[in-house]
Amino acid sequence: ALAAKPLPFPPGAKPDLTFSAYAVTSPAVIHCGQQTIVFNVTETNLGTAPSGPYVTHHFSNGAAFCAKSRPNLPPGTSASFTDTCNLWNGPCDCPPTTYTIPFFGFVDPGNAIAELDETNNQSPTVIRNAQCP
C-alpha cells in the first residue's frame, strides 16, 4: 500500500483574518473635494493556516473607496500597514457646516479566502470630523 502524503497543515486548517487595530491618522478634519486619507491598521491571522495574499478595502459612509493588496499572513501573526487613499468628498458648493464621516475597513470583502470565522472581518467604525466648504 502507498503511504499517505503528509499534509503541510492539519486537515481543516484555515486562516482567520481580522483587525487588531484600525485608525484614521490624517487629516485631522476632512474637507470637500479630493482628500488624502491615511489609515494605520494592524491585521491579524487568528487561524491555523496561512492566509495567502488577500485584499483589504476601506469604506467611507458605507461605500468602498480604496482597496489594498496584502501579502500572505502566516497563522498566529500580525502585520501593520499604512494605507494612503484618495477620497472624493463631494463638491465645495455646500453651505458652511460641520458633520462626521464614518470609516471602517474590511479584510477579504469578497470572501475569496475560506476562513474559520467569516463574521470578524470588519474593523470597528472610526468617526472623523468633516467641514464644508
Image (tube, helix red, strand yellow):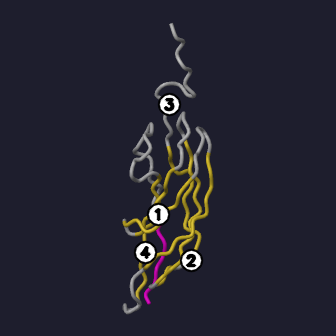
Residue 24 percent across, percent down from the top left: 55, 67
Residue behind mark 1: 58
Q: CA distance from mark 3 to mark 2?
A: 42 Å
N-term mark: 3 or 2: 3
Residue at 46% in and 28% down: 12
**Which numbered tag is attached to residue 100?**
4
Q: Is residue 26 above or below residue 132?
A: above
Closer-to-camera residue (94/108): 108
Residue behind mark 3: 13
N-term mark: 1 or 2: 2
- Amino acid type indicated by mark 3: Ala
Q: Secondary structure at mark 2?
A: loop
- Amino acid type indicated by mark 1: His
N-term mark: 4 or 3: 3
Residue 38 percent across, percent down from the top left: 57, 70
Crowd band around label 3 with a 10 angstrom C-alpha radius: few (<14), some (14–19), many (20+): some
Q: Which image quadrant for residue 32? A: bottom left
Mark nearer the viewer, 1 or 2:
1
Mark nearer the viewer, 4 or 3:
3
Residue 29 percent across, percent down from the top left: 52, 79
Residue behind mark 2: 28
Residue 43 percent across, percent down from the top left: 56, 51
The answer to whether marks 4 and 3 mark residues whose Cβ atoms lie closer than 8 Å is: no
